[in-house]
Image: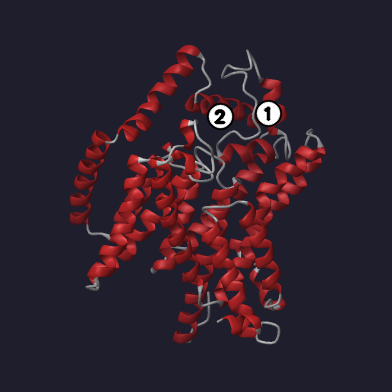
Amino acid sequence: MLSVMASARHDPFARMLNVDLMAVLVTALLPWSTSGVGIGMLVWLAALTATLELRPFLNSLLRPINVLPIALVALAAIGMLWSDASWGARLYAVSPATKLLFLPFLLYHFERSTRGLWVFIAFLASCTLMTVASWIVAIEPSLSLKGTGDPATYGIFTKNYIDQSQEFVLCTVVLALPIIISLRDGKIRLALLLTAVATNFIVNMAFVVVSRTALVTLPVMLAVFAMAHLRWKTNVLLSVAAVALGALAWTVSPHLQKTTDRFTRDYRLYKELNEPTSIGLRLEFWEKSLRFFAEAPIIGHGTGSTRGLFEAAATGPAGSAQGQVIGNPHNQTLNVAVQWGMVGVIILYTMWFAHFSLFRGEGLAAWIGLMVVLQNIFSSLFNSHLFDFHEGWMYVLGVGVAGGMVLRGAARHTDSSGTAAP
């Protein structure tokens, strides 16, 4: 393989292989590094240019799955023209959306490549290793790269508990389909292995660390799996088992009890004492963001305007919930609506719908892509996960690679059936 990689200068097969391996490396780095992912994707794009066929690529840009993310980035760039923020703030606010520009390249490449599954195997293996690191630093906190003494870093080797929980939830739900398929095909050993890996993710979230966003999105994603792939009798049995196991996990896990109890505690502290708790701040941010949106409902206040609006609307002491100033309202829809109004919201939801529709078929690639989109939509109710670095790249890489695999499968089916593509 090394000799093939080294021959990329004059071998098209080797050039394709290098692009695939670079995508595998970047995806494996995603749970561990931010700078590695940013640099790696630029290197990946440079490697891709050596394999790019201009006419087919330009034709692929006409698909809605490519037009819409490009349109959202273009709106963010154009939105700088009517913003009152400084130019530094405007440029800074555009950058989180620019990762969406990689989507057309990923979809184009993995529609040609046969190694898309390598990317997801690398992500699963990397997340599995992250659970090992999480268990280790839970036992010995001094080994964490996040430092010690802060309760928020418990069980976190690098990054944060929200990013880690997003990874573990996605891997857990995605593994449900190959487990069921393995059982139906009589591949008991493979099913047991995959079940052990999924159980490892669940146990880590139950006893080490989990985000509240994950506690909301995991049941929704599992419910979609049950409705799509299981019989109703099986669903009833699994629902009863899930409730029983969830109650048992909550009973024996002090960490899970503390996480769920924080929902009501944070809301009470916010309402009664005006303390800036996590839930209280989100309610405050959402209420003000809706007011900002009502002031400029069509095209919004412009790119990078959010922080300035919160500064003008801040009331009370800086330590109170009403006095908090932020550039991100912790909701993807409101993040877009404040800056680019209804125009931006329509593009955002149309893009989500187009990507969701891409994965309505059968097969593992369609299942992975469906869960990536669904997780991003639901988790974006509580965070701006499309624009956040880690979750945003999970979306771009997941949709790009799985979408390319689905498009490749559809093209092969069209060729074999001898019918024209719709």
Report how far apart the C-alphas of labels 2 and 1 lie in the structure.
14 Å
Query: Identity of the amino acid at label 1?
Result: Glu
Q: Say which quarter of the image contains residue 341.
A: top right
Q: Say which quarter of the image contains residue 263.
A: top left
Q: Residue at x 71, y 49 (%)?
A: 75
Residue 325, position as x, y percentages in the image: 65, 25
Report the front residue among 381 and 138: 138
Q: Say which quarter of the image contains residue 62.
A: bottom right
Q: Dot 1 lies on which element?
A: helix
Residue 284, position as x, y percentages in the image: 55, 24
Q: Residue at x 39, y 69 (%)?
A: 363
For marks 2 and 1, the one nearer the N-term is 2
Q: Is residue 351 left or right of residue 233?
A: right
Q: Is residue 370 left or right of residue 327?
A: left
Seen in the picture, residue 25 relative to 208 is either above or below; the reply is below
Seen in the picture, residue 86 relative to 240 is either above or below; the reply is above
**Colour approach in the figure:** secondary structure
- Mark yes or no: residue 228 visible: no
Query: Identity of the amino acid at label 2?
Result: Trp
Seen in the picture, residue 359 relative to 111 is either above or below; the reply is above
Report the front residue among 134 and 52: 134
| Tag 2 residue | 286
| Tag 1 residue | 295
Q: Dot 2 lies on which element?
A: helix
Q: Residue at x 44, y 45 (%)?
A: 165
Residue 210, position as x, y percentages in the image: 40, 40
Q: Which labelled disc corresponds to residue 266?
A: none
- Mark yes or no: residue 381 visible: yes
